[in-house]
């Protein structure tokens, strides 16, 4: 897909270059209809004056602020309560970061100890 991001040069849309990033699922199963509108909502949100390049500030108005502001705009449109930075971090970012850290650690140990994984044979092959 396309990754939207915000930095000192403004809003960017990229189809490559984010292969090493962590994807954090935000849409719950009962909200899959929202996925159809997601790109349109994100595009409309991204043209706002708040995301002009000169407004960027490394600590207080950055890509994290952009992502959280978009999520909060969707929550408001659904009549739900906004999330604070702390709540979003604790509920979504930290759990995914912990999973990624465990995976990376396991991967590094497998490489260092020269292990590799072989798929199990199909059950049909055993007679």
Image (cartoon, rainbow, N blue to C red):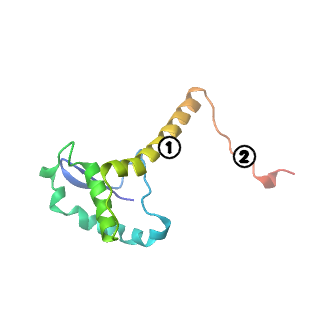
Q: Are marks 2 and 1 in contact (CB under 8 Å)?
A: no
Q: Relative to 95, is 38 above or below? A: below
Name the residue that disc number 1 marks. 99
Question: Cα distance, mark 2 to mark 1?
Answer: 24 Å
> Front-most of 12 and 36?
36
The quadrant of the image that shows the N terminus is bottom left
Q: Residue at x 20, y 63 (%)?
A: 47
Q: Is residue 99 left or right of residue 18?
A: right
Q: Relative to 74, is 117 above or below? A: above
Percent of width and height locating residue 109: 56, 30
> Front-most of 46 and 113?
46
Q: Report how many numbered discs are placed on residues in the image.
A: 2
Q: Secondary structure at mark 1?
A: helix
Q: Residue at x 41, y 68 (%)?
A: 35
Does the rendering let one see residue 95?
yes
Q: Is residue 26 left or right of residue 127?
A: left
**Labelled disc at residue 120:** 2
């Amino acid at each position: 897909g396309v990754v939207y991001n915000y930095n000192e040069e403004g809003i960017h849309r990229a189809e490559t270059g984010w292969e090493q990033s962590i994807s954090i699922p935000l849409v719950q199963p009962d909200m899959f209809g929202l996925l159809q509108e997601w790109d349109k909502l994100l595009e409309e949100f991204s043209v706002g004056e708040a995301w002009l390049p000169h407004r960027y500030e490394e600590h207080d108005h950055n890509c994290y602020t952009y992502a959280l502001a978009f999520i909060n705009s969707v929550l408001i449109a659904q009549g739900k309560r906004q999330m604070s930075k702390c709540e979003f971090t604790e509920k979504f970012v930290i759990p995914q970061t912990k999973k990624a850290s465990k995976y990376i650690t396991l991967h590094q140990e497998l490489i260092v100890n020269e292990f590799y994984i072989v798929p199990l044979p199909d059950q049909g092959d055993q007679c």
